[in-house]
Amino acid sequence: MATYEEWNKALVRYFTGGVSKGSEIYLSVDEDELKSIASSFLETKPAPRRHEKDFGEAIKERCIDSVRGRVKIAPLRAKDESGVPEGVAFLAAMVLSAHRMREDVADEIPIDESNYFIRLRDILGLKGSGRPNGMLRGIQGEEGLWRIWNDWLVERGWQPTAHRGEGARRYIDYPLSQTILRDSERDYLEGVFRDAYGKKQITRFMDSDQIAAYLRRFDFSTRRRLGQEFHSSDTARRSIFCESAFSVYESIDWDAKRADKREPHASQRSLQAGLLRRVTAAEGVTYWLLPRQLSHYWGQPIEVLGPDGQWHLLKQQREGYFYSPWATETLFLDDAGRYKCRGDSVINSMVFPARNFWVLVQDPEDPTGGEWGTWAEHNEVGEELLVVVRNDPQGRPFHELMNRLKKHNLIKWHERAQCPKWTEYRNCVVDYYDLGTVQRPAGAESLWERLKPSRMASIRLIGGLPVRNPSGWLQYFPPTIEVVGFVKQLYCRLKEHDQVIKEQRIESGKEFPLDAELSPGHYEIEVLHNDTVEARKRFYIVGDQELQPSDSVGLVATRVVGCSSVFDLRGALIEEPMEQYSGGWPTPT
Amino acid sequence: MKRGCIAIGDTSCSECEQTIAYGERYLVMDRDDGSRSRLCIPCAATKHLVGYCQDRDRRMITFLDSTEPYESYIHLPPLKRGPNLPSDEPNEFEGELAYVGEVVDERRLQELQERWDILLHWCSAEGTGHLEHFHVACCTVGIASQEYWAWPMLRTLTLLGHTESVWTGNECCWGIAGAAIVQMTADDGCYFLAGQRIPALLQKLPSDWHVSDESSNGGPTRKTVKGKFAESDVQLPGGYEIRNTGCVSMRLAELAPDWLGWKTGLRSDPDIQSHLYRFERYEHNAFTPVQTNDLVPGLYRVARMEGRSTREVCRFYDTDGRWLQGEFYGLRHLDAQLKGKCKVSWSEKRYLDMAEEQRWPFLYERALVLASGELPHRMENKSGKAFLRYSGVSEDLARLLCQKLNVEMAV
């Protein structure tokens, strides 16, 4: 049986693997996820179909004082030797309870603590009802564990999503906020996709963006919760639901009849390839594939068979993305391109989808570097976009939409560059929140959905002295907070552990000044309009003592051809020359 | 009347009397008596004669009407103020040289050193990057401004053994070097720390190491350690390691090529064509325009119009007709070699003095700086000529390097 510590480590690797920095993390644990974690991430694998029981036993053994029948929260506040919070597995048990509650309780019945704790007690093996002994309310109880998890995510460059609720759901909203699709909702979505496929509204090889656009247009009147989530103004929440729905879409065996019971979890998945645009002095503008890692990617080597007949190793460029394996001169295909993959039991292919347009954004890690790519599925307020639309008759509705939006001053672009097979709308900015005033040409709904802003305001953290490990800004050099919105006046709040420490009205496009003397710790910026939180971002101020040394040491060397030998100079270290030649003398111009 | 200028030669500040380095901006003001006063940016800032203005989407330094004061971008908290050093520092006259700028404002030096330390900590955490990235960090920390190139700052860190930097064409990338303990040449019982450095690492140093904080004379704090260290590297808790390099300056001097071998390794620039460029020859610490039919071997600044901008580079025109590219000080040293014997003076106090205009190429200067972990002091003789003094240089090291560079050494 796997120990609590093994489950804890496996859960953290599973939910943070393959997730790009800056993205939100959901600890969305259900039975399917436990099965995947057990099969791929646990060293001590449970017996078949025992993964849930195994998990429950591990939780009980570590977290329950069986003599007194109480939960032991305090020891879970620690971190293990690699700095990972030890309470994650217990939090996962809480989310599993929330998932089971959602399965059993209809949408119309209000959720409260009593419903929730019945399921939690069942997992913990505790009799009785109500909040278990040992789980105090507030920061002394499980809320403290959620805070430690949230802070750990921010320090590693991700955005947390677990948050406190209001009133009776004050504490149970933490695990509830992590639940995504229920089993019954997955079954429902499979039916929706099969039906749409039959009506030729979707194809077999669409990418996540296209599926998300389809779901946003779909009428979920019979499924209130799904409608709320897929049409939510909370971009992060909507994205995670679309990603879960996409995994349902990928798991469908189109050639087989629909089974009575959906086969849990996708047996085979494919990598999605987006697009990357580069400009170099030598080659000018070139386009490349940009493969995305699957969530839960744990670094296993994957190879893809290229059009040249060679196997290309996919190397990780950053969390969430691989380096481009090859350039492409064809941006728009009538049928999706599929490339075989090997090296992973689940991933069988890489798909370059058939599209009529691409919306590219600047590299978030290097905005001035000149590269545009499919780094984001939605655009922030005021963010510049590069929209590429095919020039053949299939692209006509999309060109028409762009022109209509511009005519009504809802969008502007710096330049429209006509290439033989496509047109680039460069440095596009969406200037208005509500694009509904423009009549969409038939067939251009997907581009309209993509361009439509999801929020009234956005927050950018720029400048300062950012550091990577932990992820944040060095003390005395905090970032500048830039707030951009579609309305002139916004309200900005700076919070530290839910306490407001500064707030003021601010004009869109202006900066919210931060005190340079902010002490090390976790902070959150909220932007409100009409008392509604439109945007929220967390950041971390890193004290000098918390800085961790980089592992990228000695990567740069000066090769010196000496009087009797060749050597590499790395600072004060003289070493034998290594394989890579690193350059010559400094030649400033 | 006041106007902003850029230093291209031997220009000193009227206030602090420090030499204004090549490429740095300074303020020229006409006095009532007809004379001119020249102020470096820090001295102009103390008189509120320099600030920032907004030019489109970036802030720029200006000596004219500014909208924001110069000090507005210095965010460090107030520092402790120690006692000021006396301005009449005794006994530091060696031969005919005197220290320049030794009227020490201790607060400013301390503040500058702390900024350098922060920059080194950031580099140690970041690991590697491009010069532009490094430039942004320098501006944020307050060591550089947007108008200045960050290469001198990176050069300083590389001289002191903390980083390594490599140029590929017009692009420079840097990387932090591994933590190392370096034996000083002049005292085999004294070492200094080089390479990667963050506070957490310093706290893990063995408790029997007596680490002292000293000035590196214009860079991060020089951490010196007294004692005897075995040849092996030092393992620290947490899996960190400090490499024992021994006396690396001596080893570098032994392995380095002679100056002809070094010159052979310089890349040539095939694009310089006489009919496309304007040429200025380096004479008496300044560049003077020359005609294209008057090109003789030496150091030149060549300029070419590219569209609406001018591209200027420094190149050395060699006797074999090649245009050599490299760091400015190295090319200038070649020019000095061409014009006459280069000289240095070495004293038993382990000082090596050289004229600033004969500053050695980067590789050899690194050997001098790594001898003590200290950057050179600026000096001047009675006639105001600028010199550089390198401390802690043993006679063996001095002789070996002078032999390699074909430089005359006076003891």
Image: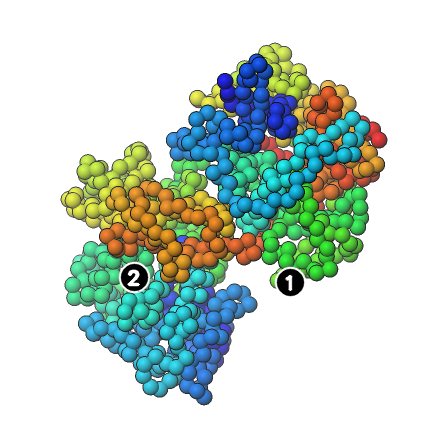
- Residue A306: give x, y in percent of width and height: 43, 50
Dot 1 amino acid type: Pro
Q: Are marks 2 and 1 on the same chain?
A: no
Q: Badge 2: few (under 14), some or many (20 or more) residues near its Cα, within 10 Å?
A: many
Find residue B271 and report its image quarter. top right
At 19% across and 66% down in the image, what residue appears? A223
Quadrant where the C terminus of chain B sits is: top right
Q: Percent x, y for residue A38?
A: 43, 73
Decide if residue A168 is on the left or right side of residue B155: left
Side of A574 where A385 appears, left or right: left
- Name the residue located 74 percent from the left edge and 42 percent from the top edge: B371
The circle drawn on residue B237 is 1
Q: Is the residue B160 above or below the residue A312 in the image? A: above
Vertical comparison of B10 with A318: above or below: above
Answer yes or no: is residue B324 visible: no
| Amino acid found under the numbered disc labelled 2 | Phe
At a point 70% along the width and 22% down the height, the residue shown is B384
- Mark in the foreground, 2 or 1: 1
Q: Is residue B310 left or right of residue B344?
A: left
User: Secondary structure beneath disc 1?
Assistant: helix
Quarter of the figure with residue A284: top left
Q: x, y percentage for residue A421?
A: 30, 38
The residue wearing badge 2 is A241
Secondary structure category for the residue under label 2: helix
Name the chain letter of the residue that bears numbered label 1: B
